[in-house]
């Protein structure tokens, strides 16, 4: 018995010693290491934090990690409450950014190539510009130190003015031979004492080494971006445009596969490349729906145009938060053929389905007839997009379901005698559409009636197709306008210039819109009498 007791004591002493030793080890030993051979860095990020996806075309952000838990903040004075998941970003800024500013634009056989320069000289400028939407802030600390023989700039930002949630942001800039490797992380000030120690350990763990690849933005400050859809297609054959479209997707898929995070999968179907962080069953269901929806679009809208409809990348994020983080990493000049959705925790959510459908529709419409997708009267483009959002599939069959809330609101409009007659939609300018929020709701129901409802059958089945065909003819005729051609040939060099160009194009179409609507009405309904319009209105209202 004594030997047994002594053996038990020895075992207990070993266990206690092991536990004590584990407690003395630094927390980074229980963390995870992210190593990027191509970019030449590694970092030990906090234990259980998630690796978030980063867009393949992201030029500065190269890695993102997010806390596995949420931290709450509440303000009793304002009754404001929110939750926050701390993030840790890795960004790379070429040292040449200090000298090479602006952008170089040139026209090539593949389109308009824009060599974009970095908008940041260093990590401090990066933090200054990317935090401007957070509220009033100031750099509360700035130090220069040396770590492992490298210059490291350490920054601390305090966000506490005009901000509903006081936050702290830290940034360390490791100076490599030709680039700054920056790490940036944030925390609610109320939870800083819990989060900062792990973040500082991660910051100190950064190591730089010889990379096997190039910087994400190339060896110079920026990278070449090819834009499509201005006047760049004029000198290209249909075969050239199709080849450019397909090669663009191939390059994008190659970049995605090359940097695919752990637990993500890539599945290819006839018309889609499914990049998924969801389970196999859900991924398969999304892929099936995408193919069914694409088949329906090809068959239903064969009269819209004959443009090359290439493959589309569908990215399925694990949840809505992961989707938001991913979209945040995409550049403003991004022109990819990608739709980003997510898996709702309870399966298909209406919003996840709607965003998937709208994304597929927008790319399909632009591929089929970009001029029509950009220049159609707003009530047409808005109504089409809203209807497409509601698509659901059973096998290969596509169905459209009405939103219960919208149906209830339509019934209220009927009781108040505020339903628009059919003739009003064909006269509806963009300004009139947005002048009353209810008009947008009614446009969706009217387009739904003509496109997939009772109006798509019987005596009114040709109304929508004939109207759109006449619209295509009218737009082709307007294409010879010198002012319009000049607007098409103008290529933006900056985000501000792009915004101004879109404003000018919108202004041009506003001036032309009323004339075009009148011409379309005459071409499509020239022989209609008042009674014909009343019958169409009665049939439409009956379905509501």
Image (cartoon, rainbow, N blue to C red):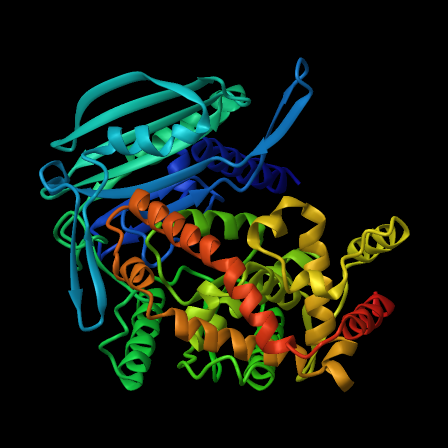
Foreground of the two, 241 or 95: 241
| Residue at the outermost right position | 415
Q: Position of residue 164 (x, y in %)?
A: 55, 22
User: Horizontally, is 353 left or right of 510 in the view?
Assistant: right
Q: Residue at x 81, y 73 (%)?
A: 531
Q: Residue at x 71, y 65 (%)?
A: 423
User: Horizontally, is 71 left or right of 189 in the view?
Assistant: right
Q: Position of residue 367 (x, y in %)?
A: 42, 74
Vertical arrangement, residue 216 with respect to residue 402, above or below: above
Q: Position of residue 528 (x, y in %)?
A: 71, 76
How many numbered marks appear?
Answer: 0
Residue 284 visible in the snapshot: no
Q: Quadrant of the C terminus?
A: bottom right
User: Horizontally, is 215 left or right of 196 in the view?
Assistant: left
Rendered image quadrant of residue 141: top left
Foreground of the two, 194 or 229: 229
Q: Position of residue 161 (x, y in %)?
A: 46, 16
User: Horizontally, is 476 left or right of 439 in the view?
Assistant: left
Q: Quadrant of the N terminus?
A: top right
Foreground of the two, 473 or 359: 473
Q: Residue at x 31, y 59 (%)?
A: 483
Residue 398 visible in the snapshot: yes
Rendered image quadrant of residue 500: top left
Vertical arrangement, residue 437 with respect to residue 5, above or below: below
């Amino acid at each position: 018995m004594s030997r047994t007791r002594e053996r038990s004591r020895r075992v207990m002493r070993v266990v206690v010693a092991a536990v004590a030793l584990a407690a003395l080890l630094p927390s980074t030993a229980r963390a995870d290491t992210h190593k990027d051979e191509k970019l030449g860095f590694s970092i030990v990020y906090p234990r259980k934090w998630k690796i978030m996806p980063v867009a393949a075309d992201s030029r500065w952000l190269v890695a993102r990690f997010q806390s596995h838990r949420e931290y709450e903040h509440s303000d009793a004075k304002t009754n404001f409450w929110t939750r926050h998941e701390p993030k840790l970003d890795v960004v790379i800024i070429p040292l040449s950014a200090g000298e090479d500013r602006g952008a170089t634009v040139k026209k090539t056989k593949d389109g308009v190539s824009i060599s974009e320069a970095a908008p940041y000289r260093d990590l401090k400028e990066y933090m200054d510009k990317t935090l401007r939407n957070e509220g009033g802030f100031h750099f509360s600390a700035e130090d220069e130190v040396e770590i492992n023989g490298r210059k490291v700039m350490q920054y601390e930002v305090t966000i506490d003015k005009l901000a509903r949630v006081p936050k702290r942001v830290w940034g360390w800039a490791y100076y490599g031979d030709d680039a700054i490797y920056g790490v940036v992380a944030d925390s609610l000030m109320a939870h800083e004492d819990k989060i900062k120690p792990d973040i500082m350990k991660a910051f100190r763990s950064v190591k730089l080494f010889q990379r096997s690849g190039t910087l994400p933005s190339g060896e110079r400050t920026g990278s070449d971006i090819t834009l499509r859809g201005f006047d760049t297609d004029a000198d290209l054959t249909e075969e050239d445009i199709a080849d450019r479209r397909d090669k663009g997707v191939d390059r994008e898929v190659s970049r995605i596969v090359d940097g695919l995070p752990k637990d993500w999968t890539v599945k290819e179907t006839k018309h889609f490349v499914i990049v998924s962080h969801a389970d196999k069953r859900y991924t398969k269901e999304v892929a099936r729906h995408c193919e069914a929806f694409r088949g329906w679009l090809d068959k239903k809208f064969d009269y819209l145009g004959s443009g090359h409809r290439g493959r589309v990348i569908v990215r399925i994020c694990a949840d809505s938060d992961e989707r938001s983080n991913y979209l945040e990493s995409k550049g403003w000049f991004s022109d990819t053929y990608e739709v980003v959705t997510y898996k709702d925790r309870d399966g298909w959510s209406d919003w996840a389905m709607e965003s998937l459908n709208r994304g597929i529709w927008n790319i399909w419409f632009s591929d089929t007839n970009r001029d029509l997708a950009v220049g159609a009267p707003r009530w047409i483009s808005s109504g089409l997009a809203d209807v497409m959002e509601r698509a659901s599939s059973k096998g290969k069959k596509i169905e459209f379901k009405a939103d219960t809330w919208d149906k209830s609101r339509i019934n209220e409009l009927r009781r108040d005698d505020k339903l628009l007659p059919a003739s009003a939609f064909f006269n509806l300018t963009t300004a009139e559409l947005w002048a009353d929020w209810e008009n947008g709701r009614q446009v969706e129901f009217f387009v739904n009636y003509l496109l997939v409802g009772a109006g798509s059958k019987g005596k009114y089945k040709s109304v929508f197709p004939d109207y759109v065909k006449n619209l295509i003819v009218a737009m082709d005729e307007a294409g010879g306008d010198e002012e319009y051609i000049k607007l098409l040939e103008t290529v933006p060099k900056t985000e501000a210039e792009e915004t101004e160009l879109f404003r000018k194009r919108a202004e041009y179409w506003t001036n032309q819109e009323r004339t075009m609507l009148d011409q379309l009405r005459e071409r499509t309904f020239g022989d209609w009498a008042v009674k014909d319009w009343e019958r169409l209105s009665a049939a439409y209202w009956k379905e509501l």
